[in-house]
Amino acid sequence: MSDFFKEIAGLSPQKLKLLCLELRAQLDAAESRRSEPIAIVGMACRFPGGTNDPESFWRLMRDGVDAMEEIPVERWDPKLFYDADPEAPGKMYTRVGGFVRGIDQFDPHFFDISPREAIHMDPQQRLLLEVAW
């Protein structure tokens, strides 16, 4: 017999009832924490297709919009890198992609990051900072 059962075996009916009430209260509190609703106090996103907030993301999903677009010339000149032959070395064989607009508009000073450091950061890190803010 375990120590716990040996210990409660010697309790009076009143103490046993108090112990049961205390255990029940702890169980109820744990269950309440598990099913307690959460509050969403903020939400943000940046996705291809000009999707910069949850509402536009929902519209994009609901309407089945294809967010793929031709490579913007401000990113790079597709003529320099495109080749219809997928085996062509150093070339790509597609002219479309999913592009997040304004990715080059990151303000490093706002995040106390030097412009030099920001240039070498992964764009996904900069995007995370902006969306989290």
Image (cartoon, helix red, strand yellow):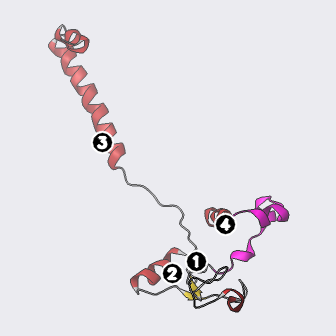
Res. 52 mark = 1
- Separation (CA) of disc 3 from disc 4: 36 Å
Could you tell me which secondary element the residue under label 3 belongs to? helix
Could you tell me which secondary element the residue under label 4 belongs to? helix
Q: Amino acid at mark 3?
A: Glu
In the rendered image, which quarter is residue 114 located in?
bottom right
Give above or below for 69 relative to 100.
Answer: below
Q: Amino acid at mark 1?
A: Asn
Could you tell me which secondary element the residue under label 1 belongs to? loop
In the rendered image, which quarter is residue 118 located in?
bottom right
In the rendered structure, does residue 103 fall within the stretch colored magenta? yes
Give above or below for 73 relative to 114.
Answer: below
Res. 56 mark = 2
Q: Pick whichever, 110 or 85, lies toward us.
A: 85
- Stretch in magenta: 101-123
Q: Quadrant of the N terminus?
A: top left
Taking the spot 45% from the left edge, 83% from the top edge, the residue there is: 59
Q: Residue 46: give x, y in percent of width and height.
A: 58, 73
Q: Residue 44: give x, y in percent of width and height.
A: 56, 69
Q: Amino acid at mark 4?
A: Glu
Please report whichever mark, 1 or 3, sits nearer to the chain's N-terminal start.
3
Q: Nearer the viewer, mark 3 or mark 4?
A: 4
Q: Quadrant of the C terminus?
A: bottom right
Side of 56 relative to 106 (left or right): left
Side of 12 relative to 75 (left or right): left
Side of 105 relative to 4 (left or right): right
Q: Which residue is mark 3?
A: 31
Q: Amino acid at mark 2?
A: Ser
Q: Residue 124: give x, y in percent of width and height.
A: 64, 66
Please report whichever mark, 4 or 1, sits nearer to the chain's N-terminal start.
1
Q: Which residue is mark 4?
A: 130
Give above or below for 96 relative to 26.
Answer: below
